[in-house]
Amino acid sequence: MNQTLGSFTDAITGHPTPASVLYKGIEMSSLSLAERLWVQWYQYWENPVIATGVMSFLLHEIVYFGRSIPWIIIDMMPSMRKYKLQPGKIPTVAEQWRCTKLVLLSHFTVELPQIWSFHPICEYFGLTTHDVPFPSWFKMAWQIGLFFVFEDTFHYWAHRALHWGPLYKYIHKMHHEFSAPFGLAAEYAHPLEVLILGMGTIGGPFMLCAFTKDLHIITVYIWIILRLFQAVDAHSGYDFPISLHNWVPFWAGADHHDYHHMAFLGCYSTSFRWWDHFMGTDLGYKRTRAKEAEARKRAASLAQDGSAQKAVPETATTTALPVKTAA
């Protein structure tokens, strides 16, 4: 019993490991500033499991709420309404506060255990954690690219499955409470949905590491940051001229995902549009956006015609004024 309890405790807290052991043979002067800060973090905790657990959780909270705050500010700016995809549906303070409380509860009860167990799982799969130096930018770029493709594919099919009768009613319906989403609502979801869709985010790194044994946790952290930005932005409810999908046609973005919340069906992907395109689950979205574009075009045409009609009488009146002659 004591041996079992000790093994469980070791998995949760790890063993204190001095820096002299962690970084034996490493020449610190050859490291970059970021790498030296990384070393100092692990030196401070003197326990890789705790150091990774604390860093992972803080990273998630800071990025998630840090990226949500700008959207909260934008929601309070009337000048931004013209970019709102559903202009009449601005989240109230009460809705945002209720969403924040539930998201925080989920983070501390559902996600924290997963995040804390991340280091032991990484070691099991052979993922590098405290080690330096970091991998090259080129290696990190192609690995993160693979993670995006894997997660988008996993999310499309898992998300589509969650719209099946019982799964939607008992799990996914909670996320659809807001038909006009906002940034904070990105992780407003049932605990089971957090677990299911979270597998797509972390599954790619673990699979790559299982096959190649060549993955550093710093690459995973950058991937998580980009994934959180994508998730929060997709739920922002805003589409700007500078939005990424206007420059990268196959990127989904808020324009794509906002329709999903409005219609409750279709547009199941996260990052890219190709699965919805190939499977025909974006037909409703395409029809809706085409009608909106036609309506805007017609309104602009009517406004232009109205301006022209106003200009004609003014000209006619000016030229038709009677000429007074001397008596």
Image: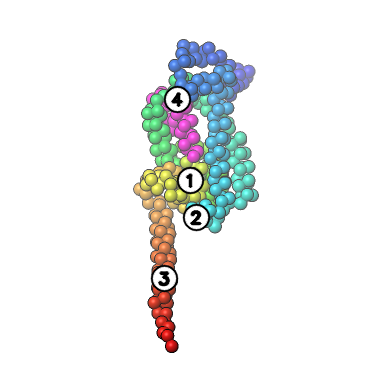
The three-letter amino acid code for the residue at tag 3 is Ala
Residue at the extreme left: 278
The three-letter amino acid code for the residue at tag 2 is Lys
Of label 4 and label 1, which has the lower sequence position?
Answer: 4
Tell me the residue that label 4 is attached to. 216
Tell me the residue that label 2 is attached to. 82
The three-letter amino acid code for the residue at tag 4 is His
Of label 2 and label 3, which has the lower sequence position?
Answer: 2
- Give the magenta range: 204-229
Task: Check if mark 1's residue and mark 2's residue have beta carbons within 8 Å.
Answer: no
What residue lies at 61% left-to-right and 43% top-to-bottom?
A: 100
Of label 4 and label 2, which has the lower sequence position?
Answer: 2
Task: Check if mark 2's residue and mark 3's residue have beta carbons within 8 Å.
Answer: no
**Spot occupied by residue 271 in the image (x, y as percentages of width and height):** 43, 42
Tell me the residue that label 3 is attached to. 311
Q: Main secondary structure of the magenta part?
A: helix
Q: How is the image coloured?
A: rainbow
Task: Give the label on residue 234, or none.
Answer: 1
Q: CA distance from mark 4 to mark 1?
A: 27 Å
Q: Nearer the viewer, mark 3 or mark 1?
A: 3
Task: Check if mark 3's residue and mark 4's residue have beta carbons within 8 Å.
Answer: no
**Spot occupied by residue 235 in the image (x, y as percentages of width and height):** 51, 46
Which of the image's four quarters has the C terminus?
bottom left
What residue lies at 41% left-to-right and 59% top-to-bottom?
A: 293
Horizontal arrangement in the rendering, residue 195 relative to residue 210 (left or right): right
Secondary structure beneath label 1: helix
Q: CA distance from mark 4 to mark 2?
A: 43 Å
